[in-house]
Image (tube, rainbow, N blue to C red):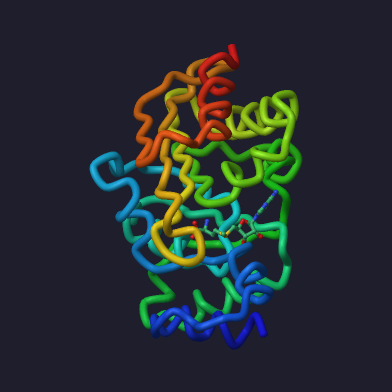
Amino acid sequence: MIEAITRQSLEQKDKPKLSMKRSYRHSQWYTEPGRVKDTFQGYLKEIDGRVLDAGCSTGETTIELSNIYPNSHIYGVDNNPELIGLANENLDSRPNRDSLKVSFHHGDFYRLKDILPSNKFGVAFAMNNWLFASLRLSDEENGFIARQFNYVLSEGGLLFLSKDNKSHLMRKEGHFKAIFRKSGLGFEEVHVDRELSYENGCDRIIDICNSLN
Ligand SMILES: C[S@@+](CC[C@H](N)C(=O)[O-])C[C@H]1O[C@@H](n2cnc3c(N)ncnc32)[C@H](O)[C@@H]1O
């Protein structure tokens, strides 16, 4: 089932019509082309180094990031091994595959310190995963994750967070996005945008990132 739906997404056909049960599963790893620019246009400045796409699903956003940051190596990480397999297939199917500096890694972004201990990233993205998961995690657990991202960023590096419900089941919820700059053991807020203001869960993450030091 995953493969069939993913093929549709890769071919950019109309959104699949799914039952509630299947849609719920689909929503766990749903992704789409063009998401990075749609969400963060205006804040995507070229860097020369490493870019992290945490929770990369089938690699759509990771491959888009490689076009946005052509001088960087893009690391896609996902804790679902099946999706890492599909991400590699997705990459290999691109006509310009040889020029794409992309690699996919199976791992949990709650454990970035362990899975990427010696890599420092100029930019890290966590799109449509941590902000959703954060709603059922304690402040302590969310603080732990924030520190993982802080650890793998180089000084001054940027953390991009988003919760994008423009498409799919949760269209009515609107989107939320935030950008932080690593400063020592904490973060400085660069930009926060709430399309709708009810997102208390996301506000908790913003508070946690702002008070990490
Ligand atoms: C809804 S998809 C979003 C994909 C992509 N980031 C985007 O915005 O289009 C969420 C992805 O995050 C992954 N994910 C969730 N929790 C994770 C974790 N703790 N570590 C690594 N990946 C995770 C899921 O497996 C899924 O592929």
Residue at 67%, 69% (x, y): give it.
Answer: 25
Q: Position of residue 113 (x, y in %)?
A: 71, 36
Residue at 59%, 21% (x, y): give it.
Answer: 208
Which residue is more in the foreground, 138 or 80? 138
Q: Position of residue 67 (x, y in %)?
A: 33, 61
Number of labels in the image equals 0
Query: In the drawing, does residue 98 fall left or right of residue 17?
Result: left
Query: In the drawing, does residue 130 fall left or right of residue 161?
Result: right
Q: Is residue 174 above or below residue 140?
A: below
Which residue is more in the foreground, 17 or 132? 17
Which residue is more in the foreground, 165 or 116? 165
Residue 194 falls in which quadrant of the image? top left
Residue farthest left in this picture: 42
Q: Is residue 79 above or below residue 123?
A: below
Assign the N terminus to one quadrant of the image: bottom right
Q: Position of residue 111 (x, y in %)?
A: 74, 41
Assign the C terminus to one quadrant of the image: top right
Residue at 40%, 49% (x, y): give it.
Answer: 174
Residue at 57%, 26% (x, y): give it.
Answer: 204
Q: Position of residue 94 (x, y in %)?
A: 42, 80
Q: Is residue 31 above or below residue 184?
A: below
